[in-house]
Image (tube, rainbow, N blue to C red):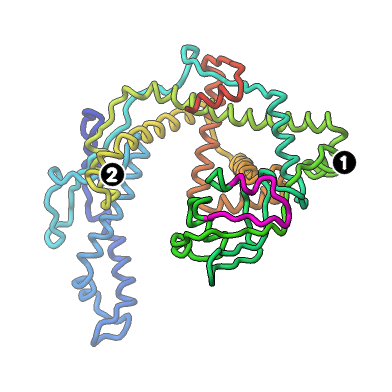
Amino acid sequence: MQIKQSEVKDMMAVLTMTVEPADYQEEVQKELKEIRKKANIPGFRPGMVPTGLVKKMYGKGVMAEVINKTIGVKLGEYIEAEKLQVLGDPLPNEELTPEVDFDTQDTFTFAFDIALAPEFDANLNGRNKVTVYNITVTDEMVQNQVNAYAERFGDYVEADDVKEGDVLKGLMTEQKEGGIVKENAMLNPQYIQEKKSQKLFFGAKKGDVITFNPMKAYKSEVEVASMLDIKKEEAKELTSDFTFEIQSITRHTAAAVDGELFAKVYGENNIKDEADFRAKVKAEIEENMAEDSKYKFGLDMKATIMKKMEKIEMPEAFLKRWVKTTNDKLTDEQLEKEFPQMVEELKWHLAKDQLMKKYNIQVEKEEVEAYAKEVAKMQFMQYGLMHVEDQYLTSFAQEMLKKDDQLRGIVERVAENKIYEALKAVAKIDEQAISHEDFGKLFS
């Protein structure tokens, strides 16, 4: 088989492939033998169909299939052998491909358009400045986290009078004949929208009976329907006043900042006293802030790399054709809208590939598993689970890595982080102390 490459012009070239009988005949004969073994043709026993008949019936289709498969394999081998960095996949060039006739030809010529990656240098140097933000952890931040732990591990107690945040349980009765009666109705005055109705509850005591209009108070049929255990459509039609007889007042109280709280947060015998507890909380916040800073550093590092890539020209006509070929459901309007982002993602892929080769970066299995555990840890923290045991993090991470899209995403994040660390040694790094509030504004 012969493959010739044309001269590269505007990042485009043509690969012309000549397929001869020696390239496909052996595989065609092999496929026809398999078909003959399994062919079920009236008048012939299985496996006894004449070879000539099998060839007549299936030969053309088999030859086309084998040649098509051979083309794909040989194109890939050629591209790899010549170390061509192609964009997308080779696409058939119909103008340069002669008409194919499997009845009369045994030698075929096929032409394919290829797009080659542009020349660029994504590497950074001392002229490229990237800031590392060191977020200051204040006493106020520590106190807020201590308060959050105290609230989380607090208790619910019975109260005598109603204050903000209390939950009331009582008997609700619609003030009309045959109206709705709801026992053990739950009500939180804090969420009442109408201030006039809200004030009726604050300061009230157990046993008091309060008259109010639920729909005017909450201004939401969803809230009222839930409280009265009725349908939204029914709640929307309500116009009557209701009485609410307060039968219980439940209040959440924060836990005391003592040994019992220390043990609940960090486990038995791990914290000596309150000072040790606050130091542990501060270290925990500093660790989280370091991760936030690392995330911002990654964003800025990527932006710096992409700044070097912004003037690179891409073979857009070919890329649009390739995208449409690989996604026939994509409309022209969608393609035009999404194409700029596709080009940016392609540039980023090229930059990463170049930098990984330059710094000999490999992604190891252990690194992927460790990062997956960090992702799992952050997800648990979003739900207030700050100290999940390692065995559960490991199990959660392993389940995550079974999903191809999540595995692929984590591998990419690990690779990117290793790229940023490599570039940290060559770029100009400016360390800057910053408050948590000002750091947050950087994302606005």
- Asked if disc 2 and disc 1 are in contact, CB closer than 8 Å, the reply is no
Q: Amino acid at mark 1?
A: Asn
* Viewer-closest of 82 and 376: 376
Q: Position of residue 210 (x, y in %)?
A: 63, 55
Q: Residue at x 55, y 16 (%)?
A: 429
* Viewer-closest of 371 and 205: 205
- Can residue 4 be seen here? no
Q: Position of residue 344 (x, y in %)?
A: 36, 32
In the image, residue 63 lies in the stretch drawn in magenta:
no
> Mark 2: which secondary structure?
helix
Q: Amino acid at mark 2?
A: Val
Q: Residue at x 69, y 42 (%)?
A: 386
In the image, residue 206 lies in the stretch drawn in magenta:
yes
Q: Is residue 359 above or below residue 431?
A: below
In the displayed image of the protein, which residue is found farthest to the bottom?
A: 43
* Viewer-closest of 325 and 147: 147
Report which residue position mark 1 lands on: 269
Q: Is residue 440 above or below residue 371?
A: above
Q: Is residue 95 left or right of residue 403?
A: left
Q: Position of residue 323 (x, y in %)?
A: 28, 44
Q: Position of residue 387 (x, y in %)?
A: 72, 43
Q: Which mark is residue 323?
A: 2
Q: Is residue 397 left or right of residue 223?
A: right
In the displayed image of the protein, which residue is found farthest to the top?
A: 127
In the picture, residue 143 is in which quadrant?
top right
Q: Is residue 248 left or right of residue 261?
A: left
Which segment did they paint magenta?
198-214
Q: Residue at x 55, y 67 (%)?
A: 180
Label 2 to label 1, Cα distance in Å?
Answer: 60 Å
